[in-house]
Amino acid sequence: MHWTNKQDQALRERAFRVIPGGMYGHLSAAMLPEGYPQFFKRGKGSRLWDYDDNEYIDYMCAWGPNLLGYGNPIIAEAVRAQQEEGDVLNGPGEVLIEAAELFVSLVTHAAWAMFCKNGTDATTMAMVIARAHTGRRVILVADGAYHGSDPWCVPALASTGTLPEDRASIVYYKYNDPNSLAEAFKANKGEVAAVFATPFRHETFLDQEEPDLEYALTARRMCDDTGALLIIDEVRAGFRIARDCSWSTLGIQPDLSCWGKCFANGQPISAVLGSDHVRSAAGSIFVTGSFWFAAVPMAATVATLKIIRDTDYLERLINSGNVLRIGLEKQAATHGFAIKQSGPAQMPQILFQDDPGFQLGFAWVTECIKRGVYLHPYHNMFLSAAHTPEDIKHTLEVTDIAFSALKKNRAIGDGSPHLTDAAMK
Amino acid sequence: MHWTNKQDQALRERAFRVIPGGMYGHLSAAMLPEGYPQFFKRGKGSRLWDYDDNEYIDYMCAWGPNLLGYGNPIIAEAVRAQQEEGDVLNGPGEVLIEAAELFVSLVTHAAWAMFCKNGTDATTMAMVIARAHTGRRVILVADGAYHGSDPWCVPALASTGTLPEDRASIVYYKYNDPNSLAEAFKANKGEVAAVFATPFRHETFLDQEEPDLEYALTARRMCDDTGALLIIDEVRAGFRIARDCSWSTLGIQPDLSCWGKCFANGQPISAVLGSDHVRSAAGSIFVTGSFWFAAVPMAATVATLKIIRDTDYLERLINSGNVLRIGLEKQAATHGFAIKQSGPAQMPQILFQDDPGFQLGFAWVTECIKRGVYLHPYHNMFLSAAHTPEDIKHTLEVTDIAFSALKKNRAIGDGSPHLTDAAMK
């Protein structure tokens, strides 16, 4: 191993002077094991390079946006060609319409689309549209589910600077618990505007959970019975489960869906899609942004949606995830570790059993990162269509060595770094 | 004139099927005079082209972002070079630090920077930071001022789907009225977290107002006296008034400033800048977005800020605005029209006197648009550094013809289209 992180350390120190805390937001490496790079110089396909010229096979995919490979040449060419013509002008280009038409043709429930920038823009718009549509206040949200960082939805544990009234009409229920959902409806009779649900339960630090069919059916039925809207927040999982809304695999269609991250393969754009009966409410609200009608991200959207529609990108990334999962399961057993692999294989969460402080997890991913494999110790990861069979094979060689090292260190009682309870709050 | 808008009409009809209302947000042409293009195909320098191949000298600059010319070659090269390396990765590039360092070196009050995407992200972050810093709830906002489209700040007239509690702790005062500001402080004693102010009063449909010095000094003093933060929302006016915060021309520095639109010449990025004493609060909040750490807009930021620092872009766009203003004033007088030109000449608002329904304004800009000059009838406009003396000269030739046509039509009692009271609500 020739791994060093000197350049990254120097950049962190420099950043600390002009950025509060040195970095902020979900890409902050502050809670990652020591040695994880904070800054990245280059991305290509499934690979990332940091400023110390370490090369990584990457399993975070920029936390989702990288669906088809960093710098995918087809998307890059669409971006280049549109930039030549125009990007942010006094109105949108024809690509706005093309992108909306493609979305409507792909996503079963969708009759229309509205584009925005952040995932949070999409979830906030969906909330406002639901209130406009129903004339009601209450939004039911699964406790612990992440729907963005606006004051109404920022995780309660990270809500410094927000007020109780920011979430005055947000009511929490338990994901996958149809009784909890029914009780929330009952307690807010006639006042529920919408139910938010993520395609599966994908919370940080926890095992991921597939949606329970009875829960999903209850959500749909109670919305139908009361006139509330079912909103699926696809920002994290969209187009990694299906070429449609993720719950289409359960035969369930929402009224609104929120999309972000990956549908323009990294170009900045998010969207709300809606069923026809919500069109009028969607047209009645005022939302906007300086860059929302930029043509370049829409051209990237058109190019990405065509690849989603026409290629086997999805089967390939699912297959990569499965090969990785099966390989890791075997390795862990061989080395005597009990790991918990949860969530869809293409969006894996990998935790160690009996590892509440993530000590084992931290030690294992640290062995991997120093050998060129970027894994996350407590957040779901993302496969991309750019991961090749050779990438997965090489990854498994590295993880095998990492398990060996872990076993050896455990035997000699090495106190690897771990997350304290305080750091998790 | 060979002007037609057939292609634009066809695109509008097509858009209507897949976008609620056909279009949304501030770039919707629904309230513009008939014939204004909704869709744009190309931009270059000071020029725009629609889908009917009409060419326009543009005075909206994409509503601000175009500071140095559409497709400015220096920015385009910075974008191209960064795209080649990487954009959205697992962490920011070194350009994050460079962009923050440049901002801090340019803007007097700033000790740090946090980047985001929308102008609304920046104003919402500033609000949350102010509450975190002070532990107080109340935010004072000038009545009628635009600070974005999140539920807490979306204009009251356009607030369908929002709740009273979304703005429960927002208290309104009158811009340029120090007494009104003092009363708001008094009525919320010990509870004011921040005062929001725009660099000048730039409201739609109204004459723009320069900031009154006593008002600005009162805002600064009352914040100092009470520990509240002064937040200047530079999203619309930033870097078109000064190479620093706009109120630096009055000798006044804020604690926080919000920036957007133009500092990456159209690439999607916005920012909050802060004084050193607010750094710790800024580091304590949680905000993020999938694309906030994209390197390409930051590379464009670095390139744009260097041009802002090193060139006479500002003097050139101010000069263009002044030549246009003086020319229009003369033409209006010659043709017997009383026009009101308000705001800085480089961000002009042009209204007709005694024209409450904007009938004259609509008729005049319609004559201009059909001759290749894009003016806005009731919103402040934007000059760019790409407007050449020839552009201004040609524009004045067109506006002269437009005044003539207006005079002739008025003589024959032509009922030109105008905004009804209903449309303004």
Image: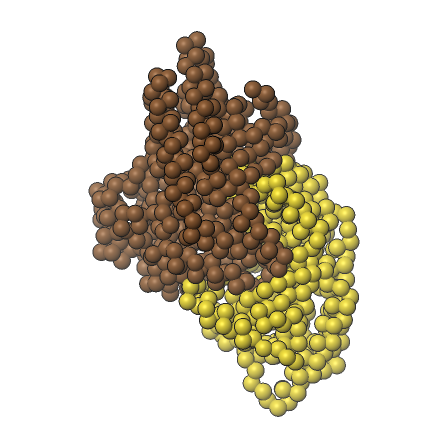
Chain colours: A yellow, B brown
Rendered residue at 53%/56% (across/down): B299
Rendered residue at 41%/52% (across/down): B309
Q: Which residue is nearer to you in this view: A33 or B379?
A: B379
Q: Which quadrant would residue A164 be assigned to in this image?
A: bottom left
A104 vs B193: above or below: above
Rendered residue at 49%/55% (across/down): B302
Q: Position of residue A22 (x, y in %)?
A: 46, 67
Q: How many marks?
A: 0
Residue that extends furthest to the front in the rendered view of this protein: B390
A93 horizontally vs A290: left or right = right
A84 vs B21: above or below: below
A164 vs A41: above or below: above
Q: Quadrant of the C terminus of chain B?
A: top left
Q: Position of residue A292 (x, y in %)?
A: 54, 43
Q: Which residue is nearer to you in this view: B187 or B52?
A: B52
- Please say whether residue B23 is visible from this viewpoint: no
Q: Position of residue B4 (x, y in %)?
A: 60, 22
- Please say whether residue B15 is visible from this viewpoint: yes
Rendered residue at 36%/34% (across/down): B322
Q: Quadrant of the N terminus of chain B?
A: top right
Q: Which quadrant would residue B337 be assigned to in this image?
A: top left
Q: Which residue is nearer to you in this view: A156 or B387?
A: B387
Q: Position of residue A298 (x, y in %)?
A: 62, 44
A228 horizontally vs A55: left or right = left
B123 vs A336: above or below: above
